[in-house]
Image (cartoon, grey):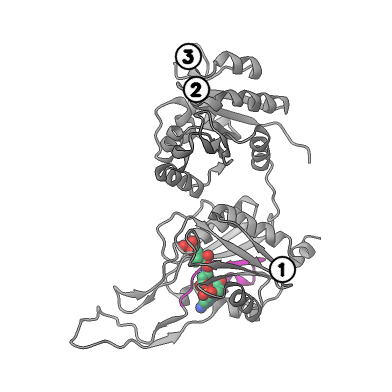
Amino acid sequence: MEKSSKTIIVGVTGGIAAYKSVELVSSLVKLGHEVHVILTKSAQDFITPLTFQTITKQHVWLDQLNLDREEYVPHVDLGAKADLVVIAPASANTIAKITWGLADNILTSTILATKAPILLAPAMNVNMYQNTVTQGNLNRLKELGCYFVEPEEGILACGVVGKGRLAATSKILEAIDRILYPNLDFLGKTVLITAGGTQEAIDPVRYIGNRSSGKMGFALAREAQRKGARVILVAGPTHIEPPLGVEYFPIVSSQEMYDKVLEFYSISDIVLMAAAVADYKPTISFTKKHKKESGNLVLGLQRTPDILFELGQNKKEQILVGFAAETEDLLANAEAKLNKKNLDLIVANDITKPGAGFNSDTNIVTLVFPNGKKVALPQLHKADIAAKILDAVTELPLFKLKKQ
Ligand code: PMT
């Protein structure tokens, strides 16, 4: 497919890596894109507008008002015409402003005004990068759907060795290419995803639940949608926002999840069961708040339906992906579940590891396939784990067969 030229806004923030954005902008212009550069005030201490104006043959946007120009409201105009907004280098300061929705300069205002995808290439001192506040901001932006090119390790301008160097121009160009010309492997596919934990009522105010936040399932939903799928997301109670544009069905109990999943199973091509479904529910659910009495209360528990097992029993052409949350014998237990539930892939997470499993922004998983193949992934943000899982789905024989 021929790649059409696009309109790209490149924001440059203050940092020694600002000079590297010249190579980036120049490469984008050579590729035929229309590039508009915005320099923050501190970026202008490192590099001049004239450099970018000469390369792009476009006005370079600073914070001064230009009453002689035809753009009535420049940030709205730039935001509207952008196919992509790239910030390289992205400083800790600008990342923090974007996270919290500040719009105190033309770059941050353009970010708020645009509906285009946003790609950030952070560059800063290693301690600033690793700072919990910066990491929290990066995670929040990932959850909101921003794209990132990770900084590289090396000798930083301050003389310290560590992670914080602006990614190589080739890597940023590769990321831009992937966003502008997305891989639509899942176009025409319906992907049914479960997320979060179920709650099994004891009475109107108490329940049996688990610590699932929904982050893993929501990351899968976002990624499947990016790859062109119709996404049906069935999720237990969660504090995070579902991705825009997915068909979202909030549920509470395992029975409600069962009903919703079964409703959509026959029209689904791929099912990704990231939810932590309660295996047991109370035998009695009191209709009124249960008053405490002297002595113990014995709560009887009964099995809930194993949704995934039932899907496996009634599988036609669907691809079924399960998750295994384990505290011991990770791979053996995951393989047993893969076979018992008739799955095409199981994602095994050892939830005892820091940075893995419930409620964490990252996960550490091993992909286990029916032919015995195992792919262990390093600790990655759940957005990146989701991308790897969907890539693995495209490699499954059934997926390839249906593509032909
Ligand atoms: O939501 P997060 O905070 O991001 O956390 C993500 C996660 C840890 C919840 C996720 O990565 C994960 O591991 N989900 C599955 C947790 C789990 O319940 O595993 P399990 O081993 O009990 O169940 C195996 C599979 O059967 C799962 O795909 C589960 O969705 C499914 N199942 C389980 C019980 C049941 N009654 N019905 C089911 O369909």
Q: Nearer the viewer, mark 1 or mark 2?
A: 1
Residue found at the very far top of the displayed protein = 68
| Residue 261 in sight | no
Q: Earlier in the sequence, mark 3 or mark 1?
A: 3
According to the picture, the residue beneath numbered tag 1 turns out to be 373
296 lies left or right of 141: left
Residue 332 % position (x, y): 61, 77
- Percent across and percent down for residue 48 are 54, 15
Amino acid type at mark 2 = Ala
Give the foreground label among 3 and 1. 1
The answer to which quarter of the image holds residue 211 is bottom left
- Residue 66 has which mark? 3
Q: CA distance from mark 1 to mark 2?
A: 49 Å
Q: Amino acid at mark 1?
A: Lys
Q: Residue at x 21, y 81 (%)?
A: 291
Name the residue nearer the viewer: 192 or 122: 122
Mark 1, ligand 1, within 8 Å: the answer is no
Identify the residue under disc 2.
43
Q: In x, y percent, where is residue 197?
A: 45, 69
Percent coordinates x, y for residue 58 in the rendering = 61, 18
The image quadrant that residue 308 belongs to is bottom right
Closer to the chain start, of discs 1 and 2, is 2
Point out the image quarter for the N terminus: top right
